[in-house]
Image: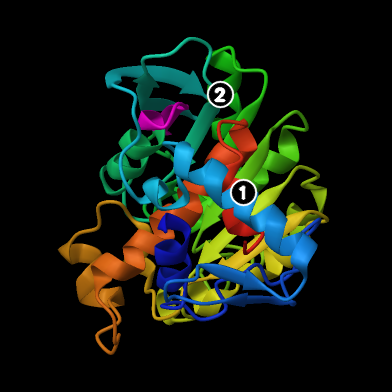
Amino acid sequence: MRIVSFITSLFLCVACAPEKTTDVVDTSEETIETGDSSIVDTNEEQGQEQEEEQEQEEQDPESLEDFIYRGAHDVSTETSVLSVTDCNMDFTVYSPNIENPSIVILGHGFARGPGTMTGWADHLASWGVKVLLPTLCHYNILAGVDHEKNGLNMVELGQAYGATEVIYAGHSAGGLAAIIAGSLDNNNLGILGLDTTDTEGIPGVDDFIGQLYASGVTSTAFSVRGEPSSCNSEGNGLDLFEMMPNSYKAKVGEADHCDFEYPTNFGCEINCENSQASVSDVEIRSLVVTFGTSAILSLAGVSEDGWIIWAGR
């Protein structure tokens, strides 16, 4: 069955299940097999419920593993410029062919650019959310690095676009900007951090800026992260999600910082690629995309299957 193949793929990651979650279904009594019998439970009543869920799932075209692939919606793009605090910010809008989709504002990492997140934007939009992908202004080493202004600019972008409820997401320092934005905008629908980093040991930048904002995030937050390394500040972004009252966290084993870009490029891989990984980048990124997409769709209310994945079912 489809759910078995997906659960089998989860075994490729270390501690993939949520590490500290809210309202997560307890699966400690379930036995998951990958043979002819899909999910087996020693409790008869629970087993019957699972059979019904599996039958319903087989009839549902949005099965769990489909989050790896492109969604059903056509996507159009348009570019624009917005005057925000201390910046004229370029951004691209990825729109699905549906009315009134939820809005996602997606931030790229430090010293990178929106080109490393276009795959994410298009993929998410194909599942039925509208994605605004800005060029964050305040990552310029010469002009000054200001993560707080990047977060503020993300909020300003949503407001200027007329969005009253926004999902903030980002990779690396873009995840930090998303957390800052989420703390400034109390009406946000939630946050997704992709291998998020906090500030630490950067000349001219205060340490642990994210900790000033993380506890102010009251919405649901999701973190998908890789192995600690110098490229993700030794995984210090996890501390930010630990400070949030309603957060879900998944670690993808052997994933490096580049696995969370979509697409990545040589500039990242030459510095941050995990050359010792025992599984392929394709397998690792499939898990990253599945967890990231399911988080966004859960926050947007597009698909309940996203919660199933994050509950470890």
Sooner in the amino-acid sequence: mark 2 or mark 1: 1
Q: Which colour scheme appears in the figure?
A: rainbow
Q: Secondary structure at mark 2?
A: loop
309 or 117: nearer the viewer? 309
Residue behind mark 2: 102
How far is disc 2 from disc 1 in space, using C-alphas?
27 Å
**What residue sits 67% from the left and 66% below the top?**
208
Question: Which quadrant holds residue 199?
Answer: bottom right
To which quarter of the image does residue 94 belong? top left
Whether residue 11 is visible here, answered yes or no, is yes
The crowd level at tag 1 (other Cα within 10 Å; few <14, some 14-19, many 20+) is few
Q: In this rendering, which labeled residue sits more in front, label 2 or label 1?
A: 1
Query: Does 179 appear in magenta?
Result: no
Seen from the viewer's position, the closer of residues 49 and 233 is 49
Three-letter code for the amino acid on which mark 2 is drawn: Ser
Check disc 1 and report its element: helix, strand or loop.
helix
Q: Using a 10 Å C-alpha cutoff, classify the residue at mark 2 as few (fewer than 14 neighbours), some (14 to 19) or many (20 or more).
A: many
Q: Which residues are magenta?
A: 125-133
Vertical side of 52 occupied by 271: above or below: below
- Numbered mark located on residue 76 in the image: none
Res 171 visible: no
Residue 211 location in percent, x, y? 73, 61
Q: Using residue 304 as the reference point, say whether residue 161 is left or right of it.
A: left
- Which residue occupies the foreground of this view, 201 or 96? 96
Quick check: is 130 in the magenta stretch?
Answer: yes
Percent x, y of residue 19: 69, 72
**Residue drawn at (52%, 19%), measured in percent from left and top?**
101
Q: Find residue 85 and report its horizontal and vertical position in percent.
A: 55, 27
